[in-house]
Image: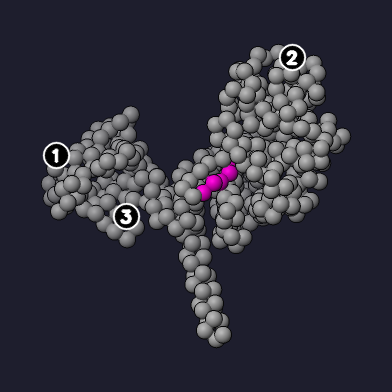
Amino acid sequence: MKKAILFLVVSLIVNSLKAQTDSEKLDEVMQAATNAHLFNGVALIARHDSILLFKGYGWRNYEQQIPHDTNSVFQIGSTTKPFTATVILWLREQHLLDLSDKLSKYFPSYRYGNQITIKNLLTHTSGIYNFTDQHYLANLADKPFHQRDFWKIVADKPLEFLPDTRFSYSNSNYMILGYIIEQVSGKSYEQMVREVIFEKAGMTHSGFDYRHLSSLYKSAGYDTLDLKAPQRARLSDSSATYAAGAMYTTAADLYRFSQAMYNNKIISQASQEEAFTPYKGNYGYGWYIEFAPGLKFMAHNGGIWGFQSHFKRIPQDHVSIILLRNEMLGFEDYAISLHRILYHDPNYYIPRPSVALTTDSMLPYIGEYQLKDKPAFKANVAVRDGNLYLTWTNLAPEKMYAEKTDQFFFKSYNCQIAYTRDPQGKITGFVAHNPGQDFPYEKIR
């Protein structure tokens, strides 16, 4: 018995140390992304129901010098769509609608109503024109917007393809789902999301009308958060983004939603399995579905003026990866790095600031290289489309990013290239720095 207890204690200590190591790696990636001006917001990463990283980075409000903490509130744009889809599935479980229902049942005057089903809306296979065009963005998105305004834009537009024949992402689909939710329930879309999801999941810091939100934790949205000249973003109106992208929340509340779904508190496991099955393309019901060796995960990103969100879930390990930011930049490849750290893949990318090179400055790096003492292993460096690419033996070309003179890195995995020169300044080779290993290459032509 004592041996069993000792083994349990040792196992707990080892697992704790491993979790701490993963936490440090996750924080290292996110801090590096912040230092490289690639991330400004809050990150929450959890696995097996244990939170490994929950931290704010950068500024909630730069002008007032308020840093982010874990309470920061963000708009999440299209990450609203999984919530809309979940309410639709809940209504289906209450036998209040069916996914095979035609739109003509709810909008009899819409001329394509007999051709399109609720399932087509959920899976972006309706062919309906995407109403968020340039006119909408320039003139309508920051003003009150009504259902009649939506139909004025969409009603007379021809379908872009025959329904159910292919996938094409369209915000119109989820606007219509919101209108259906209101028709079927007799309640507002916002009220239904609160009753069906927020209350069950304990999401007490989430809502829809960000413009009028009064909170000490409300994040300012930026087009660019250049610390010398930050540019504030326009603020969209929640009625204009509605069921396709109006939601605001915190990282903690998104995690509560994720956990509630894992524990089947909102919709059944059967409904979730259906939602997490890719239909046309890799989209299910409100989620992009992806596969990795031995893994299936669902994710959705959101982008709206001044804000971006990244929400990924891997059910088999109860993984949740949540990145919320209040500036308009892509998530680069550090989001993939977080996934790799969780699954103990050492080839994760640590973000670094990159500098642009002229074509002339790239020329000295071009050539063929071989690993010292192992001539079968070669590397070729060439210019393609104005960028340097390195091709390892039998592998696809990898784009090289310059950190400084003679120093390069990749964004697909954790490897840095440091060029070597002779006393006259001529390049003689490079050293490939991998985690814990260095591989010296010499230039052969």
Q: Which residues are magenta?
A: 295-300
The outermost residue toward the right is 186
The residue lying at 72 percent from left, 47 percent from top is 268
Gap in Å between the C-alphas at discs 3 and 1? 24 Å
Task: Please state which of residues 296 and 38 is positioned toward the viewer in this rendering.
Answer: 296
Residue type (three-letter) at the residue carrying disc 2 = Arg
Q: Reply above or below: 297 against 143.
A: below
Q: Earlier in the sequence, mark 3 or mark 1?
A: 3
Label 1 crowd bin: few (<14), some (14–19), many (20+), radius 10 Å:
few
The label nearer to you, 2 versus 1, is: 2
Q: Position of residue 6 (x, y in %)?
A: 52, 82
Secondary structure found at label 3: strand
Screen quadrant of the C terminus: top left
In the picture, measured across the screen, residue 285 lies left or right of residue 209, that is: left
Whether residue 35 can be seen here: no
Screen quadrant of the N terminus: bottom right
Q: Position of residue 148 (x, y in %)?
A: 79, 21
The residue under label 1 is: 445
Gap in Å between the C-alphas at discs 2 and 3? 60 Å
Residue type (three-letter) at the residue carrying disc 3 = Asn
Q: Earlier in the sequence, mark 2 or mark 1?
A: 2
Secondary structure found at label 1: loop
